[in-house]
Amino acid sequence: METPNWKWLVATERKKAVLVTLLWGLGITFTFAQALLQRAYLTWFDYGIAFAICVLAGAVTIDLTRALASYLGAMVLAFILLLVLLTLPAFLGVIPPPGDVVITNLWIIVVFDSLFPFPLLGFLLATFLGASLGESYL
């Protein structure tokens, strides 16, 4: 039996950048969703995990311009997925009509309050740190 060849996923720089951006966005989404669904706020540990994810993703992308583009794509993906994940019960009708608007607005406020502006700037600096480390040592 032949083993599958997964090298086509990272055969070109563009495919590698898309894969890193998708995994990066999913990692940030899962980290924030776990924290927000358990405690409704992020702790320093959660911010540290997201910081480490950004450093590692920046190191994998190596180039500063690609790291910036991947960062922007990953953060947009993370915000969209996080808001959809958190407001899904309201959209599915699990929460009755007066409460669904309140829950949706509440989660939007909590997400944007948790992530703007300082965490996003910190994650951007982590991305640049990782990219510069990747350029120097990888």
Image: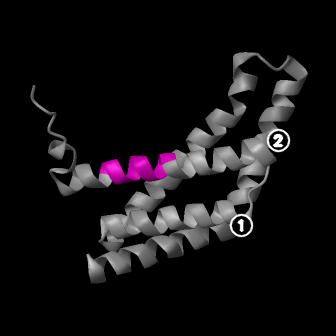
Q: CA distance from mark 1 to mark 2?
A: 22 Å
Residue found at the far bottom of this picture = 136
Of the pair 65 and 45, the residue shown nearer to us: 45
Label 1 neighbour load within 10 Å: few <14, some 14-19, many 20+:
few
Residue found at the far right of this picture = 98
Residue at 26% x, 75% y: name it: 138
Per the image, label 2 sits on a secondary structure element best described as: helix
Where residue 19 appears, as percent x and y from the top left, is 32, 48
Q: Which residue is mark 1?
A: 44
Is the stretch drawn in magenta largely helix, strand or loop? helix
Residue found at the far left of this picture = 2
Label 2 neighbour load within 10 Å: few <14, some 14-19, many 20+:
few
Horizontal side of residue 16 vs 47, given as left or right:
left
Q: Which residue is mark 2?
A: 106
Quarter placement of the N terminus: top left
Where residue 12 appears, as percent x and y from the top left, is 16, 53
Where residue 17 appears, as percent x and y from the top left, is 30, 55
Per the image, label 1 sits on a secondary structure element best described as: helix
Residue at 72% x, 50% y: name it: 111
- Image-quadrant location for residue 100: top right
User: Of label 1 and label 2, which has the lower sequence position?
Assistant: 1
Q: Which residues are magenta?
A: 18-26
Horizontal side of residue 85 vs 89, given as left or right:
left
Find out whether residue 96 is within the magenta segment.
no
Horizontal side of residue 55 vs 51, given as left or right:
left
- Amino acid beneath label 1: Trp
Q: Is residue 68 visible?
A: no
